[in-house]
Amino acid sequence: MCFNANAARYPDLQTRTILIKPPQPRDYKILVTSRFAFKRFGNPYELKPLSPVDAKTLFCQSASVSESDPNIHDEMKQILKGCGGLPLALLLAGGSLRGKDYGTWQSMAMKWSERKFALDLGTDMLDNLKKLLDVLDTKDDIKECFMDLALFPQDQRNPAAAFIDMWVELSKQDEDGLNNLDEDGMIAMDNLQELNNRNMAHIVDTRRLANVKDKYYNYHFITQHDLLWELAMKQSSKVPMDKRKRMIVHIVGNDIPHSWTKRQKLKARVLSISTGENFNSDWKKCNIEPTEAEVLVLNLQTKNYTLPVFMEKMSKVKVLIVTNYDFSCVEFKNLELVGSLSSLRRMRLEKVLVPFFVQLENLKKLSLFMCNVSQAFESSSHPISNALPNLAEINVDYCNDMVELPNGLCDIVSLKELCITNCHKLSSVPEQIRELVDLEVLRLNSCTDLEELPDSIRSLDKLRILDISYCRQLLYGNNGHPFLNI
């Protein structure tokens, strides 16, 4: 049994982690890895930095260069000395130099020499990594993307689509007021790929056919080394409160930050709030006014949750991302507050019970992952076509209570992309789908109980992508013969 005991930042988790006991001690050994020594576990074994030979091998693999390349011998020697045998530093330095020309190698070695620092395991690791990132030739937009990775909890596999939604909206207008259009998220995905190339984050592609390139990123996830996550958190906290671009808050228990009890306006464009399983506050003591926020990220771990009352004043929010890390769906006590977000364009909900759709006239994209949605889609008092009249894209993934495609969806004539994936109980698509005259993309992949498609799909003249991969009942009927009723 092996676990990482780096839980000092999370009191609730630390107690649980330390008390882990194997059911049959004679058959198990416990290996604890930590950056701190725990006396109760006996004498710790300190892992040493990599040897010069191993360090060079790891660095060269990361940089994709030969260990015996004579053209960069001196530069490599200087950089390896600066990395001090720390694997993460070697990966970061090597990743930043992969595919670069000789001039970049010279510049990197010179910066290392000028700063005269080494990654000493006896000093503050985060300070050392900060020095390393300062040396790396990293563009400002990549650094900003790196900092945004801390908006989500540590040690999680976070969806790339969430970052893309956020960056697409935030980048639509730069500091000079110029429009930067990236509606399909290609530039945002390129930034994630750059972080991956530099080993500052890692992209996990869960598609079965990973070579398919169709600008569909729902199967891409982002992971990150915990030290890099902590570095992003630490750098964000160093910025004065009134100058922060992103406000990241982790609430332990019900302890809302004391400064939030006083009336104040927040200027941050991005607000991220993480709460644990013991959080049950109604936010009445909170007096902040995040009126400038354009992105709101809520990370939960509970079955019941009260949305922050200050959402009523967040008229500039364009992106709402709610992720519940509990095992079951969360129920909001005041879901109607979402309707206050009058500028909302993109909303992503994960493990949320959705009883109805609130009125959001400007919403363009809705993503529902592992949610309970049947009640909302079947509601006659809150039909989705009335609540979301300008919706252009909807993604429903792993929502197992969706048995049939709701007729109400077919009344949203503005819809261009309809993606119902991994909904294994979905069995039918209505003839009314012909009403979606502007539909360009229809994804029904991995809906294993889907038996047939209506002939009316033929009338969708603008349809350019029809994805029915891994629909077993559709591709092979009950008699074992392939058929498609289109």
Image: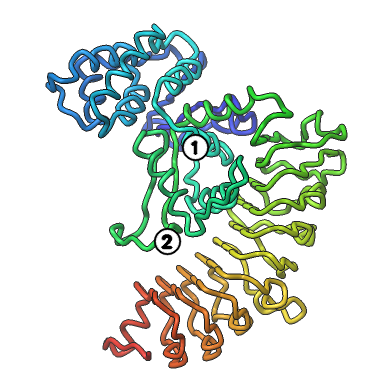
Please give the count of numbered marks on the rendered protein.
2
Give the crowd class for mark 2: few <14, some 14-19, many >=20 residues within 10 Å.
few
**Residue 269, image x, y percentages:** 67, 41
The answer to whether residue 2 is left or right of residue 280 is left
Q: Secondary structure at mark 2?
A: loop
Name the one closer to the observer, 254 or 485.
Answer: 485
Residue that mark 2 sits on: 216
Residue at 35%, 72% (x, y): give it.
470
The answer to whether residue 236 is left or right of residue 483 is right
Residue that mark 1 sits on: 141
Residue at 25%, 19% (x, y): give it.
55
Q: Secondary structure at mark 1?
A: helix
Picture quarter containing residue 275?
Answer: top right
The answer to whether residue 149 is left or right of residue 196 is right
Residue at 37%, 63% (x, y): give it.
214
The answer to whether residue 448 is left or right of residue 104 is right
- Asked if marks 1 and 2 touch (Cβ < 8 Å), the reply is no
**Residue 14, image x, y percentages:** 59, 29
Q: Is residue 126 above or below residue 435?
A: above
**Picture disc at residue 255:** none
Name the one closer to the observer, 338 or 332.
Answer: 338
Quick one: quadrant of the C terminus?
bottom left
Type of amino acid at the residue the image marks with label 2:
Tyr
User: Does residue 442 appear in the picture of this structure?
Assistant: yes
Give the crowd class for mark 1: few <14, some 14-19, many >=20 residues within 10 Å.
few
Name the one closer to the observer, 446 or 40.
Answer: 446
